[in-house]
Amino acid sequence: MNRVILASQSPRRKELLTAMGVDFEAIPSDFEEHLDDARDPALVARELALGKAMAVAEKYPDAYVIGSDTIVTINGRQLEKPVDEADAKAMLRELSGKPNYVTTGLAVVNLSRNVRLLNDDTATVFFNDISDDEIAAYVATGDPMDKAGGYSVQKLLGNMVDHIEGDIATVVGLPTAPLARMLEGCGITARTLNEADVADAAGF
């Protein structure tokens, strides 16, 4: 039996990987991530996903370790998690009425078998015009504080978020189609989730 580790404590990633039918354990990575506006967010997301996976794989070299990192980009600027409520409000004001681009990088690593697979996917999220009162009410829930870009799409789709172009799983933080192919190539059974599966797993 192949041991699979998800190098993340994200409930959303755990829910999606469970729905993909993968037997795994979650061990958060202590890798310190840094964004870089001067570089393509897809390359940065891949590097960060690999860094997260490698930090855990070094402790568990016989396991297949999955790393993932999500970057929200708007106006050429890569948004990190908000540092405080004021920062979260500023991010949401910037997102209001505009599209933003959500890129999730993936890495699958097994050091003992010399496996190092990388992939990424990008989707576009279209925000409605949102008022300061709507922003304040959402920030007051605490939901934006641990999310790249200051929002989780499953909380906002249909009100503050108008629609998504691309794979909704990418926005949630784990694109299941490329990940399923990567895992299947390692002999690990995994299924790609459709939009309804993602909605069920992520609590839309």
Image: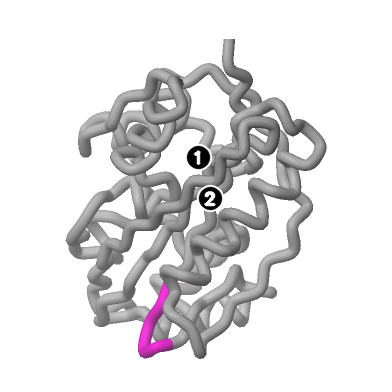
Relative image position of residue 172 (x, y in whole percent): 40, 49
In this view, the residue in front, 182 or 19, is 182
Q: If you read the primary sequence from the N terminus, does the residue marked by circle 1 or circle 2 appear first?
A: 1
- Tell me which residue sits at (69%, 32%) in the image: 112
Position of residue 126 in the picture relative to residue 35 (left or right): left
Quick check: marks 1 and 2 in contact, CB under 8 Å?
yes
Question: For the magenta stretch, what is the residue range?
Answer: 72-76
> What numbered label is drawn on residue 138?
none
- Tell me which residue sits at (52%, 71%) in the image: 44
Pointer 1: what residue?
13
Pointer 2: what residue?
68
Relative image position of residue 183 (x, y in whole percent): 43, 30
The amino acid marked with disc number 1 is: Arg
Label 2 Cα neighbours within 10 Å, binned few <14 / some 14-19 / many ≥20: many
**On the rendered image, what quadrant is the C terminus found in?**
top left
Element class at badge 2: strand
Give the label, 1 or 2, closer to the camera. Answer: 2
In this view, the residue in front, 151 or 30, is 30
Distance from the alpha carbon under mark 1 to that under mark 2: 9 Å
- Can you say whether 100 is above or below 63 in the image? below
- Can you say whether 153 is above or below 59 in the image? below
Relative image position of residue 161 (x, y in whole percent): 27, 64
